[in-house]
Structures are given as structure tokens and as C-alpha cells.
């Protein structure tokens, strides 16, 4: 009888331990241009609390930060790269395309291509240490898509960040792709069914600020549209963290990367302190 009880207990604890070890924690990162630097701070705060997401989904800047994290780069490394490579300078990021090139955007992706080539030695979704899902907009079919496998990792990450009318659209396998945030800025749908817990970070929450200038009208119109296409993704998150750097900075304030990073870090720390149950559920 004792042997039966012992075997039963061993089986129970083995199953429990296996479940704990295999718990999948998802992290969804929204688009937002320079506001996406807040994602780095949010990840830093998560790791400091022992929360280590192993399934990542992102749109636009969220896809860029997400793929670097999925490859194994730590937040402190990302910050150092931004500083060393001067990726906070618009002159480094916004390279006007030669007039002889195709006219699918004003600026080229050379900075993003160089960065991904430098930091990721392969070009395969399946070779990443963490599961990664990139959201892109298929312009030919007017719908958003999730790419998570295959050997065109960098092409799809770049496509995910191809802000329409700003950066050139990406032609991949004969299809035209642009910024994933155009139609789905918080792609929780990609990983909801794969994870035990999903944490979302939205760096473009709605703020209802009054427009005072033409440029304010443009930014607020774009943000309103992206907020609307994020509603389903926001609803599917177990925990949703909002960074309000958007109240002070805009999508092209790359030089404020450190201040925006701090917004994300503070937002995540504050959220965890108010939701301590998050620590138990994510470990």
C-alpha cells in the first residue's frame, strides 16, 4: 500500500513539475515607432521580477524589439546598441531612397536590415530560442497576417515596421506587405491559444488629448485608428500595461529613447505592484 501511495505522489509531483516548467507566458508588444522604446523598459521590469516570457508577438516597433528579445538579447544590451549605433538619430534611421529605386516609400530599411543582420546570425523563425510571431499587413488582400515560421525572418520583421508612406513597402514572394500596426497594432490573437498567461504592452493607449496643430490632428487620427484595431487584442490579454510616454513624445522622437524606456519600465513596475497575483501566475 505504501508503495502505491509513494508512486502516486511521485506521479503527481512529476506532472505538476512538468506543467510548471512548461508554463507558457506570452508577451505582446504593440507598434508605436519611437514610443516602442518603452517595450525595452517593460521587459527589463518583467525580468527583474522573475517573469520571463517565452512566447512573443509584436507589430511594427513591437516586432523589432520582440525579435531581438526572442533571439536572446537582454534589455540592457538593447539600450547599449541604441547608444553605440546612434539609432536615436533620425539621420541614421531615415535614409531617403535614391530616385532610381522603386517608389513604394520615401525611406529605405537599410538601418533595420543592418541591425538585424548584425544581431541575428540566422534568418529563421524556427531558430529563435523563444517562439516569435510577427504581425504584417498584406496590402494586396487588405488583411493582417501572422508569420511565425520559415526562413524569411528578417524580411517579415522589416515588413512589420514598414510604416505606409514613410518606409518602403516590402515585396515578399510577390506580395506587398506593410506595417502590421496598420490593421492590428496589438496582435494577441497570434498567441492567445498557445499561452497560459498573456501580458500585453500597449505604447499607444488612447489619451483624448485636444489637437492644437495640424500635426496633432495627423498623429491623433492615426492613433485613434490603431487603438480601434487593437481593441480585440487588448481584450484577450490577461494583463495589459499601458505606457503613457505618448503624452509627452511622438512616434518619431527617437532621440528621447532613454526617457521613453523609463516610461515603460515605470509602467510595468507600477502595474506589477498593483497586481501581485501576476507574479504567481507567470512563474
Image (cartoon, rainbow, N blue to C red):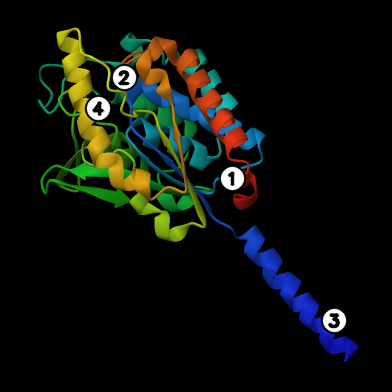
* Front in this rendered view, residue 93 or 193: 193
User: Which residue is most to the bottom?
Assistant: 1
* Front in this rendered view, residue 209 or 187: 209
Separation (CA) of disc 3 from disc 1: 33 Å
Residue under pointer 1: 278
Residues at discs 4 and 2 in contact (Cβ within 8 Å): no
Query: Callout 1: helix, strand or loop?
Result: helix
Q: Residue at horizontal 43%, vertical 11%? A: 256
Residue under pointer 3: 6
Q: How crowded is mark 3: few (under 14 residues within 10 Å), some or many (20 or more)?
A: few
Residues at discs 4 and 3 in contact (Cβ within 8 Å): no
Numbered mark located on residue 223 in the image: 4
Residue under pointer 2: 251
Q: Residue at horizontal 41%, vertical 55%? A: 192
Which comes sooner in the sequence, label 4 or label 3? 3
Residues at discs 4 and 1 in contact (Cβ within 8 Å): no
Amino acid at each position: 500500500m505504501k508503495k502505491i501511495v509513494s508512486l502516486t505522489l511521485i506521479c503527481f509531483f512529476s506532472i505538476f513539475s512538468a506543467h510548471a516548467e512548461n508554463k507558457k507566458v506570452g508577451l505582446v508588444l504593440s507598434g508605436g515607432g519611437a514610443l516602442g522604446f518603452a517595450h525595452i523598459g517593460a521587459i527589463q521590469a518583467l525580468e527583474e521580477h522573475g517573469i520571463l516570457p517565452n512566447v512573443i508577438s509584436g507589430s511594427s516597433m513591437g516586432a523589432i524589439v520582440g525579435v531581438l528579445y526572442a533571439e536572446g538579447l537582454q534589455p540592457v544590451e538593447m539600450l547599449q546598441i541604441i547608444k553605440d549605433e546612434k539609432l536615436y538619430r533620425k539621420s541614421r534611421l531615415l535614409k531617403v531612397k535614391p530616385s532610381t529605386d522603386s517608389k513604394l516609400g520615401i525611406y529605405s530599411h537599410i538601418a533595420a536590415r543592418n541591425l538585424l543582420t548584425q544581431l541575428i546570425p540566422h534568418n529563421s523563425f524556427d531558430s529563435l530560442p523563444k517562439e516569435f510571431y510577427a504581425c504584417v499587413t498584406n496590402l494586396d488582400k487588405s488583411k493582417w497576417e501572422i508569420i511565425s515560421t520559415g526562413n524569411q525572418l528578417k524580411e517579415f520583421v522589416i515588413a512589420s515596421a514598414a510604416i505606409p508612406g514613410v518606409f518602403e513597402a516590402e515585396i515578399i514572394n510577390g506580395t506587398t506587405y506593410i506595417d502590421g500596426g496598420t490593421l492590428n497594432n496589438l496582435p494577441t490573437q497570434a498567441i492567445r491559444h498557445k499561452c497560459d498567461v498573456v501580458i500585453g504592452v500597449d505604447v499607444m493607449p488612447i489619451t483624448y488629448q485636444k489637437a492644437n496643430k495640424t500635426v496633432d490632428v495627423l498623429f491623433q487620427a492615426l492613433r485613434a485608428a490603431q487603438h480601434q484595431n487593437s481593441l480585440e487584442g487588448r481584450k484577450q490579454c490577461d494583463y495589459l500595461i499601458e505606457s503613457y510616454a505618448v503624452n509627452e513624445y511622438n512616434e518619431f522622437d527617437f532621440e528621447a529613447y532613454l526617457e521613453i524606456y523609463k516610461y515603460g519600465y515605470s509602467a510595468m513596475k507600477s502595474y506589477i505592484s498593483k497586481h501581485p497575483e501576476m507574479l504567481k501566475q507567470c512563474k
